[in-house]
Image (spheres, helix red, strand yellow):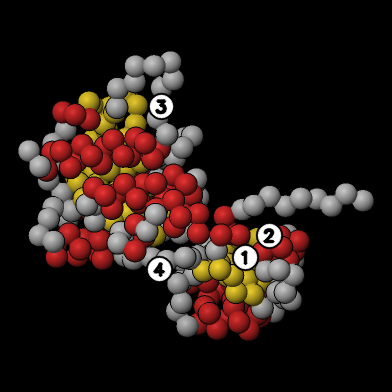
């Protein structure tokens, strides 16, 4: 019988802790956990307690086949449960704003709305560091995490750029706006990006590679900005678009 091949996934890029006791201690310790993996049909007994604690901490929970968890942990006895540990600890949005204050600069933040390709996220983080951005905000769900692929694509920038992971992007956008940050979403049919003044506290929202920004995120933005398209296709790669817009912010602030 031919063995079914398991494709490389983002989970393979991350450190994993398995076994019910080990996972429970990792959760209790307050350690930074990217997500909880639970084998289908294993949600009873002590696993139910682990799920409850992860849920209370806002840790994403993903149900997976036993074969996948076997593969990820090298066929160690995982007892139906494992937690993925990010390559780099996440920061908070407050950390990002504090960094801007320490530098005596107007906040410059990149918000990634469901960027799923780890290469794109890594490239965005790398460019953000080069442009002097104060941090990146990503959602907890439906987004690339800080995996080894992201770290490699960022080429060391993860050591210098805070990345905050939040439960609800719309809520965070509203909080930023209350603190004087102007939020601009990158999308089609917006204003010419070169005619926008980014010298004030600014956050740029980059949408998903295929769907763009979510409707509620788009509606929360103070303005929509666009890059002109002169070819046959109507969109740029997410990390390329982010790079163009980030350097426009730099240009606005260094006139």
The residue that mark 4 highlights is 89
Q: Which quadrant is home to the C terminus? A: top left
The residue that mark 3 highlights is 235
Find the residue positioned furthest to the right. Answer: 1
Task: Report the Cα–Cα distance between label 4 and label 3.
Answer: 32 Å
**In terms of sequence position, does the residue under pointer 1 or pointer 4 come before the other?**
1
Task: Report the Cα–Cα distance between label 1 and label 2.
Answer: 6 Å
Q: Is residue 186 left or right of residue 139?
A: left
**In terms of sequence position, does the residue under pointer 4 or pointer 3 come before the other?**
4
Badge number at residue 37: 1
Labelled pair 3, 1 in contact (Cβ < 8 Å): no
Q: Residues within 10 Å of mark 4 (few under 14, many from 20)?
A: some
**In terms of sequence position, does the residue under pointer 2 or pointer 3 come before the other?**
2
**In terms of sequence position, does the residue under pointer 4 or pointer 2 come before the other?**
2
Q: Is residue 12 left or right of residue 76?
A: left
Q: Nearer the viewer, mark 3 or mark 1?
A: 3
**In terms of sequence position, does the residue under pointer 1 or pointer 2 come before the other?**
1
**What residue sits 40% from the left and 53% below the top?**
154
Image coordinates of residue 28 in percent, x first then y, are 50, 82
The residue that mark 2 highlights is 64
Q: Is residue 237 above or below residue 163?
A: above
Q: Is residue 181 visible?
A: no
Task: Report the Cα–Cα distance between label 1 and label 4.
Answer: 19 Å
Q: Is residue 157 visible?
A: yes
**What residue sits 74% from the left and 76% below the top?**
77
**In terms of sequence position, does the residue under pointer 3 or pointer 1 come before the other?**
1
Q: Is residue 36 above or below residue 4?
A: below
**What residue sits 39% from the left and 54% below the top?**
155
User: In the structure shown, which secondary structural element does the residue marked by tag 3 occupy?
Assistant: loop
């Amino acid at each position: 019988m031919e063995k079914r091949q398991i494709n490389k996934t983002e989970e393979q890029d991350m450190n994993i802790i398995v076994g019910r006791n080990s996972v429970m201690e990792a959760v209790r310790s307050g350690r930074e956990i990217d997500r909880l993996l639970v084998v289908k049909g294993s949600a009873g007994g002590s696993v139910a307690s682990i799920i409850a604690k992860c849920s209370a901490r806002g840790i994403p929970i993903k149900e997976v086949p036993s074969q996948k968890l076997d593969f990820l942990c090298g066929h160690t006895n995982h007892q139906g449960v494992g937690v993925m540990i990010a390559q780099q600890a996440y920061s908070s949005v407050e950390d990002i704003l504090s960094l801007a204050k320490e530098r005596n600069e107007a906040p410059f933040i990149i918000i990634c709305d469901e960027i799923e390709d780890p290469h794109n996220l890594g490239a965005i983080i790398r460019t953000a560091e080069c442009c002097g951005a104060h941090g990146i905000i990503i959602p907890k769900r439906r987004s690339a995490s800080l995996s080894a692929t992201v770290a490699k694509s960022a080429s060391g920038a993860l050591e210098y750029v805070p990345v905050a992971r939040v439960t609800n992007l719309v809520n965070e956008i509203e909080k930023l706006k209350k603190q004087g940050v102007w939020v601009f979403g990158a999308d089609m049919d917006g204003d010419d990006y070169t005619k926008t003044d980014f010298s004030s506290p600014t956050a740029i929202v980059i949408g998903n590679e295929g769907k763009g920004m979510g409707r509620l995120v788009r509606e929360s933005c103070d303005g929509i900005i666009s890059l002109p398209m002169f070819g046959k296709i109507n969109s740029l790669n997410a990390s390329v678009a982010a790079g163009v817009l980030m350097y426009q912010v730099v240009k606005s602030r260094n006139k």
